[in-house]
Image (cartoon, rainbow, N blue to C red):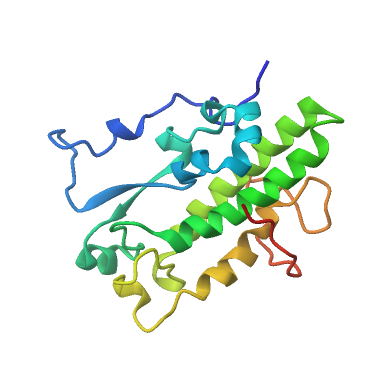
């Protein structure tokens, strides 16, 4: 029996959110995947995702893996949220690196404890989704750029993604590691640890 952090609530499909023609449709907002669907096409993660089942991760569940972000510069500045317009390869690369750490942990333990490896990988993926959501919603205080035209990021460069990667590290650390903790509020500890080499696809 497979366990899922994404099935604790009723699923909400991306297609049903902010749908043109619906009463609550807002043309200036776009749907953003916290864990990009492109990850499913990366061969290096195929074995893990086949074992976990993408439905258990909730790739297409807006409640666990989605966020509405502004697609217009004026709205981005007003709302204090990242501009979502077109591709965001730097963000995708960052998330791919974090998934690489999770895959490395899964592949090293699945042969010894299949069930334990599954449950730990799902836990770490859910924590990564929460950490990404929290980081994207930080707004004016510490804005993150998804798009080079983002007014919140004027005068910044994309090197801030390196700092974000360190912030998110603990959300992809194995259970019981020195830098990982799971607080009573259900969030992963985002304290930046000492830098470690990243497993790449």
| Quadrant placement of the N terminus | top right
Residue at x 73% of width, y 52% of height: 173
- Specify whether 149 is left or right of 136: left
> Could you say where residue 71 lies in the image, as x and y percent from the top left?
25, 57
**Occupied quadrant, residue 192:** bottom right
Position above or below: 35 against 47? below
Q: Which residue lies furthest to the left in this view?
A: 21
Q: Nearer the viewer, residue 43 or 54?
A: 43
Residue at 34% x, 80% y: name it: 154
Give the image location of residue 79, x and y in percent: 29, 62
- Residue at horizontal 51%, vertical 27%? 55
Q: Residue furthest top?
A: 1
Residue 155 pos. (x, y %):
37, 84
Q: Is residue 84 above or below residue 42?
A: below
Depth check: give the residue in front, 78 or 70: 70
Q: In this view, does 184 lie above or below 139?
A: above
Outermost residue to the right:
112
- Is residue 129 or residue 43 the one in the foreground? 43
Residue 119: quarter of image: top right
- State the image coordinates of residue 6 (x, y, percent, origin top left): 54, 30
The image quadrant of residue 5 is top right
Q: In this view, does 6 lie above or below 172?
A: above
Q: In this view, does 36 lie to the left or right of 18?
A: right
């Amino acid at each position: 029996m497979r366990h899922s952090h994404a099935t604790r609530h009723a699923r909400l499909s991306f297609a049903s959110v902010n749908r043109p023609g619906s009463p609550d449709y807002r043309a200036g907002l776009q749907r953003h995947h916290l864990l990009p669907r492109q990850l499913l096409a990366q061969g290096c993660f195929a074995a893990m995702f086949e074992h976990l089942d993408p439905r258990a991760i909730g790739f297409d569940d807006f409640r666990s893996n989605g966020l509405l972000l502004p697609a217009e510069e004026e709205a981005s500045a007003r709302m204090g949220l990242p501009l979502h317009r077109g591709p965001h390869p730097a963000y995708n690369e960052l998330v791919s690196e974090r998934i690489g750490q999770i895959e490395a942990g899964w592949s090293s333990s699945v042969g010894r404890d299949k069930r334990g490896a599954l449950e730990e990988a799902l836990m770490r993926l859910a924590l990564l989704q929460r950490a990404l959501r929290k980081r994207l919603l930080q707004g004016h205080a510490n804005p993150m750029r998804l798009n080079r035209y983002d007014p919140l990021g004027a005068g910044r460069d994309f090197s801030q993604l390196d700092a974000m990667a360190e912030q998110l590290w603990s959300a992809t650390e194995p259970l019981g590691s020195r830098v990982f903790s799971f607080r009573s509020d259900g969030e992963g500890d985002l304290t930046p640890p000492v830098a470690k080499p990243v497993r790449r696809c």
